[in-house]
Amino acid sequence: MVYLFDGSFEGALSAVYEMFYAKANPEKDMMCIRTLYQYDIFDQVVECHTSSEYAGKVTASIIETFGEEAFRRIGYAYLSEDEQFGTKLFRALKRAYRLGGNGLENFSDEAIMTLYKCYNAVARESHRMIGFIRFAELDKGIYYSQFEPTYDLLALVVPHFVDRLGDQLWVLHDTKRRKAAFYNKTDVHFSDLDPVEALYYSSREAQYQKMWQAYFEHIAIDERKDKRRHIHMMPKKYWQFLTEKNTK
Amino acid sequence: MDALKKLEILADAAKYDVSCSSSGSERKSVKGALGNAALPGICHSFAEDGRCISLLKILYTNKCLYDCAYCINRASNPDMQRAEFTPDEVVDLTISFYRRNYIEGLFLSSGVVRSPDYTMEQLLAVVKRLRERERFNGYIHLKGIPGADPKLIEQAGLYVDRMSINIELPTTKSLRLLAPEKNRNEMIAPMQMIKERIVENKSSIVRYKHTPAFVPAGQSTQLIVGATDEVDYKIIKISEALYNRMSLKRVYYSAYVPVGKNAIVSMNHTDALKREHRIYQADWLLRFYGFTADEILTKADPNLDMEMDPKCQWAVRNPHLFPMEVNKVSLLELLRVPGIGNVTARRIMAARRFGPVGFDALVKMGVVMKRAKYFVTCNGKYFGDIDLEPRKLRTLLIEPPKKGANQLKLFDLYPNVFNSGGGHSGLSI
Ligand code: SF4
């Protein structure tokens, strides 16, 4: 049986509700995103509707049984944009409810570990991004950052920057997903935003970029150069937006 | 000389300083002001030597009156280009880098220019302006200048997160030999003072809410390894004493790198790094795994085995404690099994509540079975397939030399600290 949902977080939770209700089989049954699903003549398909009532019930039950932290992790796992997220979620929950209480921490269980890995990948990249995000000062005193994380973590990193760069105007722009967070020294708002064609930098921006690049180059110890480790810790996929890796 | 040129010179001069960790302080942001300090520490970049860049690590100046033989900035080193910042230049760099999210904060050290007091005054001016004028709340790690008026060091302590006074050399004898202008007491006395002030400050924070924090992330120090002939046992014992008696947060070790001409010790570079690496692993056992120095090494067997990590060495010496049943032993015992780290031990403890943990589950939870299999049983089953005989064990556990041995992965083997909130905690050294 294949349960189809719309790809949203609420949709996945609603489908979980329906799957539990229908006593779906965790070994065989799957949850798939409607637009990605490739029809197979042998599949039996169930169309699930996104329902805030169902999603709310599942949320409440997860929080009540496993705690808020467990629910937060499920939210992170969703942001991994893993195509199999729905199936993984259902299988992990199915196992965890049998165990109760700390069920989602039973890492020796394959289904639970599989879901945990989605969470962990997002949590790791969020932590990484908090370091790797770079701002450049535009001519109107706005600090602008462009980045393209592997996972959809814009909303996860925003609170960190609200806290840290609370006295400056900034924009965090995920150009891969074409959306941005805008901060005006009091609130943040999110909105769709296409890649910006031309950016006008403040007069001193180039100077600070040059200094940072110089610092980056000079702080490395030549005798201990270790390209492999360098790339391992700071994978190439991030270089495009790292000021220090973009010297002309 | 413009700021860019100074930055190049003074970053070069600071790069051999190993401590760059920004963790350990949780400085809350203040509304309308700039910055905070995040507890797990954040790496903003990785230099081409693979090290984490977290702080803007620079010297205030590399001009120096002293002549410490192991130091690149020593007065007698003729090939050095010298530079000196002004306090405002350092402040501006810090703030501008911070606003662009290049750094977590500042790590400022200095050569001794004019006099220890004069130098300390400049450093004090930097941190004071950052905190008071710029309302900067990011992380600051400051080096205390040995020989400076303790009052200046104490004053600076009110503005910084971490302070360190470097011990540099393990014994008075080697200090006399290589850094004749410094004396042990000039290092120990301020350390003692900082320790006492931290304790005092903690209790007054409890009593009066608005007491400013004094060195909230604690103090650290640095030891140079391999410039003189101390054995590893001696070094680990000193570190243990510094942790226990001085309540230091970290001891950093730096393999002596011959700098410039008249290298004092001609040690093979790779060996020096390997030794530094092993000492870091031993230090890790002291801090996070509940080992004592005397368990790690003994007077009779005073040096770390370069071919095996210190936990394996300990296990090989204590075969009577193994194999341990992973489903029975305590967390502290699990932590003593080679191949099981902090994160995996906690996962095992969590999983055990749901029933016995088997061999495959251990693999999935991240246990390094290559090492652990000799030391554990799962539900009574043993997978090591050998008798626990020290000599045989040793041959099995020896790490094969890595390809391109001088590309030693200094940090690969450090276990990550278990961290529940924001994902993994990048270890920054
Ligand atoms: S006092 Fe410090 S900077 Fe000066 S030579 Fe000694 S170690 Fe180097």
Image (cartoon, helix red, strand yellow):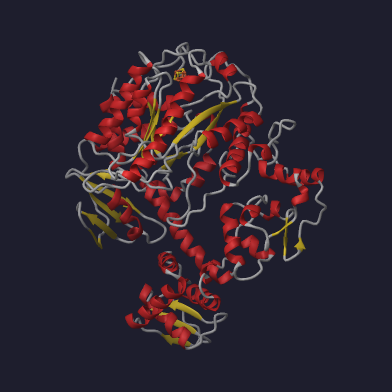
- B176 to B337, vertically: above or below: above
Number of marks in the rendered image: 0
Residue A56: give x, y in percent of width and height: 35, 78
Is A51 left, or right, of B406 in this rendering? Answer: left
Name which residue lies at 56% across and 21% down: B258
Q: Quadrant of residue B292?
A: top right
Image: B53 above or below B82: below
In the image, is residue B237 above or below residue A10?
A: above
User: Foreground: B194 or A132?
Assistant: B194
Residue under the point 34% across and 40% down: B204
Residue B420 appearing in the image: yes
The residue sitting at the left extreme is A140
- Quarter of the picture holding the N terminus of chain B: top left
Left or right side of B202 for A192: left
- Determine whether B380 is above or below A135 in the image: below
Q: Residue at x 76, y 64 (%)?
A: B381
Foreground: B202 or B163?
B202
Quick check: B398 left or right of B70?
Answer: right
